[in-house]
Image: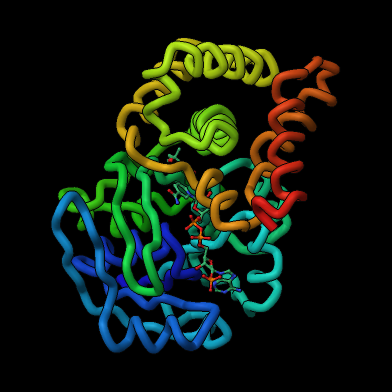
Amino acid sequence: MRIGIIGGGSIGLLISYYLSFKHEVTVYTRTSNQKKKLLKEGVFLERSNNKDNISVNAKLYTEWSSGTEDLTVFCVKQYQLTEVIQNMNIGAGDHLLFLQNGMGHLKLLESLNIPNIYVGVIEHGAYRINNNTVSHTGIGIARIANFKGVENSFIRSFTLPLKDSFPFVVEENYMEMLLKKLVVNAVINPLTAILKTPNGKLIENPYYKQLFDSLFNEVNDILQLEAKNTYYQNLVDICKQTANNRSSMLKDIEENRKTEVDAILGYLIEVAAKKEIDAPIVNTYYHSIKGMEFEGEGK
Ligand SMILES: NC(=O)C1=CN([C@@H]2O[C@H](COP(=O)(O)OP(=O)(O)OC[C@H]3O[C@@H](n4cnc5c(N)ncnc54)[C@H](OP(=O)(O)O)[C@@H]3O)[C@@H](O)[C@H]2O)C=CC1
Ligand SMILES: CC(C)(CO)C(=O)C(=O)O
């Protein structure tokens, strides 16, 4: 398949590398420097003590045009999506896959008049070292589900060739898939960003573990999860699988970038308000992260 990847950040480079072994990948970058570097040298991936590269095609995102690729994968931050989409002339025949954390982008996806939209979650840790090098810091799994449209055969022709190198689990229920990931990001991301610690420490340090459990309990109350234990186990499993990873929110704060807290804890605050549920813990962490952004620890 021909795949377009919008955004050459941590996740964009990670999936460009793995997908390139089985699909024909073009990375759409924001800057011409990154485009040139990718065209000249390809994408490098560091994992354990190995470093490998693979060549990719690269273009500026302004060069994206409808119908060129079979599938376009959006790897920008949730808060960058609106602007990116406004500048693309997306056609009814395009197939789009969105990999953002949180649930904040769902309203935007609902408003798109496009029949074939998929959503995915990436339970891997990845960190962009430079314009064409990514470190794969936590090996997890990727998941994909239909958001609109019914073309499961299309999803399979994307995922099947990747089954040994970068497996995607095809999920039947996109809402359940996104909720599971929301719970993971609502607990791991703010705590790691505030405590400045890798993911695994949240369950290894007994004091951090108390914060972890109390935040999870409040998230569970807000979302009124039916299978609380399954969600908790999933959270703990991902924490273990990505134990050495610094979460995307921690990295955003460390690198003075805006975080995705609005799409994660901000979304939960909205849900809690609608259900008239008190959410003191979620509010505390939300305002802590917003305060850190305000102070310049995340512009
Ligand atoms: N990193 C991780 O471990 C994980 C991240 N995620 C999710 O994946 C998504 C992407 O995150 P991540 O890769 O970490 O984010 P990054 O900030 O590393 O990457 C975002 C990329 O989008 C690019 N971009 C921004 N605007 C445009 C534009 N107009 N056109 C083209 N490219 C653009 C940026 O370009 P530039 O660099 O030039 O600014 C950057 O390369 C997020 O929603 C995140 O929550 C999910 C699981 C794990
Ligand atoms: C899976 C996890 C928690 C990996 O750190 C992530 O999604 C993130 O950092 O945003």
Q: Is residue 197 above or below residue 38?
A: above
96 to 210, vertically: above or below: below
Q: Quadrant of the N terminus?
A: bottom left
Q: Residue 172: which quarter of the image?
A: top left
Q: Residue 265's quadrant in the figure?
A: top right
Q: Position of residue 38 (x, y in %)?
A: 34, 81
Colouring: rainbow
Q: Residue at x 73, y 57 (%)?
A: 111
Residue under the image location 57 percent in, 16 percent down: 211
Query: In terms of depth relative to the viewer, which is nearer, 281 or 112?
Result: 281
Percent x, y for residue 180?
50, 29
Residue 199 place in picture, x, y as percent: 42, 32
Quadrant location of residue 285?
top right
Report the side of 175 relative to 284 (left or right).
Answer: left
Q: Residue at x 49, y 69 (%)?
A: 7
> Is residue 175 among what the camera can see?
no
Residue 128 lies, in percent from the top left, at 39, 61
Q: Is residue 83 above or below residue 38?
A: above
Identify the residue shown where x is 62% and y is 54%. Answer: 78
Q: Is residue 22 visible?
A: yes
Give the quarter of the figure containing the C terminus. bottom right
Of the pair 156 and 163, the residue shown nearer to us: 163
